[in-house]
Image: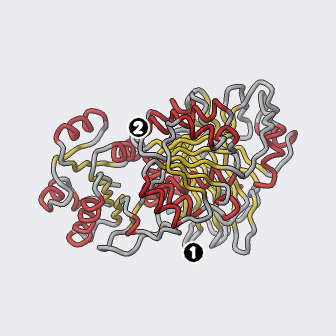
Amino acid sequence: MNVLIIGAGRRGQRLARHLIEENKSVTFLDKDQSRCAATEAKLDCMAVCGSGTDLAALEHAGVSSADAVIAVTDSDEINLVACGIVCSNFPNVKKTIAATRSISYISAEEGEARPILGISNIVNPDYEASERIIDVIESGLYNDTIAFPDTDFLLFTIPVSSKSPFAGKDLIDCRKKIPGNYVITGILRNGEALIPSGRTVIKKGDTLAIIIDNDETYSLLNQMGDKSKPKRPKKMILVGATGITRFLLKKLSTDILRGVILIEHNSEICEEFAKQFPDITTLNAKITDETIWEDEDISKADVLVSLTDNDELNIITASYAKRIGVDRTMALIKTNTNYMQFAKNLEIDAPISTTVTVVDSIVKQLRGDDVSTMHTLFDGDLEVYEYVIPDDFRYLGKALKNVDMKGRMLIAGVKRGGGEAFIPGGNYEFQEGDSLLFVTSHTSGGFFEEFIK
């Protein structure tokens, strides 16, 4: 696949790195000459200096031979116009994706793009980040947590201590001795993500990615020595009235909204949010003011989510909240993904990167129309897809045990119409309309694409 990326910023470079590792051919188009040079020095790709809205520059960058064009500059207008030009002049390009921050181009409730200029997909960073935060809050787990719509499945990660019942056992023994409707879908070991087999032995220090029936989550955590029962927050502090905050408040259930306190330093924005969301408490104050912590008794909150446009303030706020007694904390990271590990080392439960969530959404679009959701874990090394089986799927009617996945991916869950969801055994047969949860390593992403063709 040939991919043209317009915009060589942090999102473009992370996306390119992801695609290049899958042996896809990537070309950049960016108007900043120094950024083009830096990108070519860091990545195995070509970078052309020019504007995405310049037809000659697009042609010089090889748009005529591109399978997909992705515009991720910092300008909504450039991204939309660039993709519109491609759609109008280069019908051979199969997929055009534009990143935009304006809510005008998507449905605020569902995040679906409104038809515009023939563009295939529009991705909104604020909406994607809010969806990730919702998963964490609604699950009550506050770590790497993914919920799958219309099922009872959750995916979460948990470290293995020396006292864990999983430590020293292979997966077959775990299934025999530790009951539950769950699948260990991935292991992070010494910085490397593994897709385990039945004979893979779990070691102290591993981090496990587990897909489980939601009703059994606490039971499994309890067996692993984690006594912190998942819970929905009764008192939640939101810091910063931003676009992400708006999407988040639109998606939260009414019972959670009643316990939300929003802290925003801009009085006009405060008034706007107070009118739009009457169920929450909106306070005009600065989070750096010590009195707000005492007046609102923030240390007694179940969760604090810092959502300002300042990465450093978000990390400091969430870390301090954790230190004074807030049960769970989350911090938004918008500009520097290197802060993700830094935030975890400061005991922040769930750092959320807009760059990571946007790249996940774009990769999902590139995988094909039958991929309904896509998430990454372990800094992108593990990928989880929800794939709906079409009528021309080549394995229709075949049993899972008779399909060779070469140890490069596994199917951790199946969802059927009518609400039936289950973890498949070897006798499961692929049926049209089934929604499958595929788990694969990032380096095997190309194998997943070949498998579903």
Q: Quadrant of residue 429?
A: bottom right
Say what secondary structure mark 1 lies in.
Answer: loop
Could you say which is closer to the camera, residue 142 or residue 199?
142
State whether residue 386 appears in this view.
Answer: yes
Q: Earlier in the sequence, mark 1 or mark 2?
A: 2
Examine the rendered structure and indicate whether residue 357 appears above or below residue 199: below
Q: Nearer the viewer, mark 1 or mark 2?
A: 2
Q: Could you tell me residue 397's position as x and y percent?
A: 67, 69
Examine the rendered structure and indicate whether residue 382 appears above or below residue 41: below
Amino acid type assigned to the residue bearing label 1 in the image: Asp
The residue that label 1 is drawn on is 391
Q: Could you tell me residue 136's position as x and y percent?
A: 63, 50
State whether residue 185 appears in this view.
Answer: no
Position of 113 compared to 235: left or right?
left
Q: Could you tell me residue 323's position as x and y percent?
A: 63, 30
The residue that label 2 is drawn on is 336
Q: Residue furthest left?
A: 56
Could you say which is closer to the camera, residue 245 or residue 152?
245
Position of 204 compared to 1: left or right?
right
Q: Residue at x 66, y 63 (%)?
A: 253
Amino acid type assigned to the residue bearing label 2 in the image: Asn
Q: Could you tell me residue 128's position as x and y percent?
A: 49, 56
Q: Residues within 10 Å of mark 2 (few under 14, many from 20)?
A: few
Q: Residue at x 33, y 64 (%)?
A: 96
Say what secondary structure mark 2 lies in.
Answer: loop
Q: Residue at x 81, y 37 (%)?
A: 227
Q: Quadrant of the N terminus?
A: bottom left
Disc 1 from disc 2: Cα separation: 43 Å
Q: Residues within 10 Å of mark 1 (few under 14, many from 20)?
A: few
